[in-house]
Image (cartoon, coloured by chain):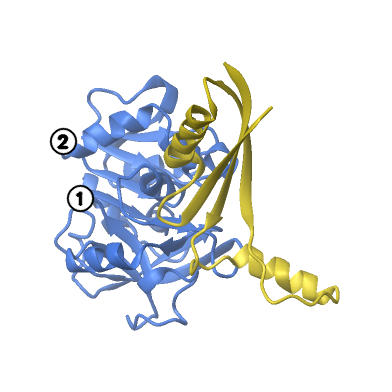
Chain colours: A yellow, B blue
Amino acid sequence: MTAYTATVTVRLKRGVLDPEAETTQQALERLGFELSDLRSADRFEVDLDAADADEAAARADEMAERLLANPTIHDYDVAVAER
Amino acid sequence: MTVSVVQFGGSNCDRDAVRALDHLGVDAERVWHEDGLPDDADGIVLPGGFSYGDYLRAGAMAARAPVMEAVREAADEGVPVIGICNGAQIGSESGLTPGAFTTNASARFQCEPVHLRVERADTPWTAAYDEGDVIEVPIAHGEGRFEISEDAHADLVADDRVLFRYCDADGNVTDAANPNGSTDNVAGVLGERETVAVLMPHPERATLPDLGRSTDGAGILRAFA
């Protein structure tokens, strides 16, 4: 078994309104920053032991499917690195 | 008829639901989720509140609590189930109903009376109304914006599963009358069975005559009477 960290990034699908990101963008603009757009995302770092990177990724993928993301509004991706 | 009002950590409208049902002559009891669903539950309310502090997404944690497996089984057997506010979020997160409820377009918590147009009058939840009736019921939520994919929305409309839409006092479904940016002004939907429904507004806060501005919500809870 190898120790991995699987990083699951969950973000709103393109086209789904993100009021929190809009509010954050407005606050940045009030501070004088210039930006064309801003998106927010949730990142989960999951430490787990697995036989190989594929197994670690598969397990993290299932975590995203079953809890971390809501498929109605979210896309997600998984990246695995040895810990 | 004994209605189980399922209480999660952070539920806070469970007592209101029991009182409103008592007022309508319906036997109701609060059931702590860890104690499981009673065998004799012949109605289920998923009440409002902030279960698990809205961690991750509103309703996400409670939707995956073991009691929800029993709720889904009961729903499949035809036991009437209604999710109100946080209960609606739990219902959609658990797959009882389509779509998702997420952050209001305003990005703010909104607590205000709204008008709803009754889109179906031939369900247990709306038998007290006529189609097209306008009722006044309050909302109190930060994550009530109904989101659904275009395809799923088309199916929802084709299957006539929209139960309530936000409207103005005259029943016009307009952007101005949409408090939270919900897709197609949807405020409440049916599950696969008409006996399963979720809605963001609070009928239990518009049932007791001495509370609030209207008792228009009583008709929804009369499904259990």
CA gap between label 1 and label 2 equals 12 Å
Determine the chain carrying the residue at label 1. Answer: B
Q: Is residue B224 found left or right of A21 in the rendered image? A: left
Disc 1 target residue: B192
Q: Quadrant of residue B65?
A: top left
Q: Secondary structure at mark 2?
A: loop
- Name which residue type carries label 1: Glu
Q: x, y (%) of residue B194? A: 18, 52
Q: Nearer the viewer, mark 1 or mark 2?
A: 1
Residue that appears at 79% across and 70% down = A28
- Name which residue type carries label 2: Glu
Between residue A47 and residue B175, name the one nearer to us.
A47
Residue that appears at 31% across and 56% down = B218
Disc 2 target residue: B77
Q: x, y (%) of residue B79? A: 20, 38
Quadrant of the rendering where the N terminus of chain B is positioned: top left
Q: Is residue B149 found left or right of B138 in the rendered image? A: left
Q: Quadrant of residue B30?
A: top left
Q: Is residue B113 above or below residue B87?
A: below
